Amino acid sequence: MNETDKRAPELDDDAADEALAEAYNRGLERQKSGDLKGAEQAFRQVLALDPDDSGGASIRLAAIGVEASPEKMPDAYVATLFDQHADVFDEILVDELGYCVPLLLRDLVGRLGLGPFDRLLDLGCGTGLTGMAFADCTTRQTGVDLSEKIIELAYDRDVYEDLYIGEAVEFLEGFEEDDGTRPVWDLIAATDVFPYLGAVEPFLNAAADRLDTAGYLAFSTETLPDEIMDGRSYMVGPKSRFAQSEKYIRTSLDVAGFDILAMDPITVRLEEGNPVPGHLVLAQLR
């Protein structure tokens, strides 16, 4: 989603929630006007009022350069963000932002001559765009997303055999079937997860542990120019999403035991009409 114009989370009408909404919107207004000191003060007030950070104030502070980038976005923020946009999710993502990564991934898999796949795990599944793109070459699909409302929309699409509400890394590390077995998949996809992760090592290590022998991992990343990254492995960009450097992704995949089959530069989406560069990555467990 486009966080640039996001307003405060929908809150109850008590005084504490009103103060939280006022501080959050004041921070957005100060940030937009270029008053970064005023924005910082407002976002720090938001964090004091809402330690769970459902409004993503910590991400805003990193975006304006007054705090180091955290290792990931707060779960409460991601869930709130997508719950609020659930009813217009596809309209915004596909029609306004030009998002087509699932189709690009399906095309890449076809060009490499891979598949069909027995079991697909779609992390950050959203409303099911990746599930739909791979419906013709997978036998069983499992979807996972932090947003309960988004999961409801994915359920209505009827492309997944199983759907779960949860955070990607926690699901990979802890999920068990009802009989206590830990399932593995031959394809794990995460087509819009890394912009919310920051540090990728926990995800890659957990994914490696859940792939079948020589299984495949597919994901997309966003990038920023080298002069902005300034040698950093990852950072929160000016639009409040994480970018990772190509070198960091390549090195992390190698350490986690993956061989890169493709790392293609793509336009991930549009932001205020401008293309957002990134990579489409397909790797195989070594």
Image: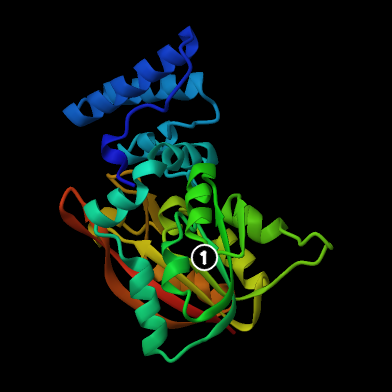
Q: Which residue is mark 1?
A: 159
In the image, taking residue 37 as reference, residue 146 lies left or right, namely right
Q: Nearer the viewer, residue 87 or 252?
A: 87
x and y, in percent, of residue 191 in the image: 43, 64
Residue at 53% x, 55% y: name it.
155
Estimate how packed mark 1 is, as few (under 14), some (14 to 19) or many (20 or more) residues with alpha carbons within 10 Å: many
Q: Residue furthest right?
A: 179
Total count of labels = 1
Q: Nearer the viewer, residue 92 or 20?
A: 92
x and y, in percent, of residue 192 in the image: 41, 59
Q: Nearer the viewer, residue 250 or 85?
A: 85
- The type of residue carrying mark 1 is Val
Does 280 appear above or below 157?
below
Residue at 28% x, 73% y: name it.
265
Q: How is the image coloured?
A: rainbow
Secondary structure at numbered mark 1: loop
Q: Residue furthest bottom?
A: 113
Residue at 48% x, 44% y: name it.
73
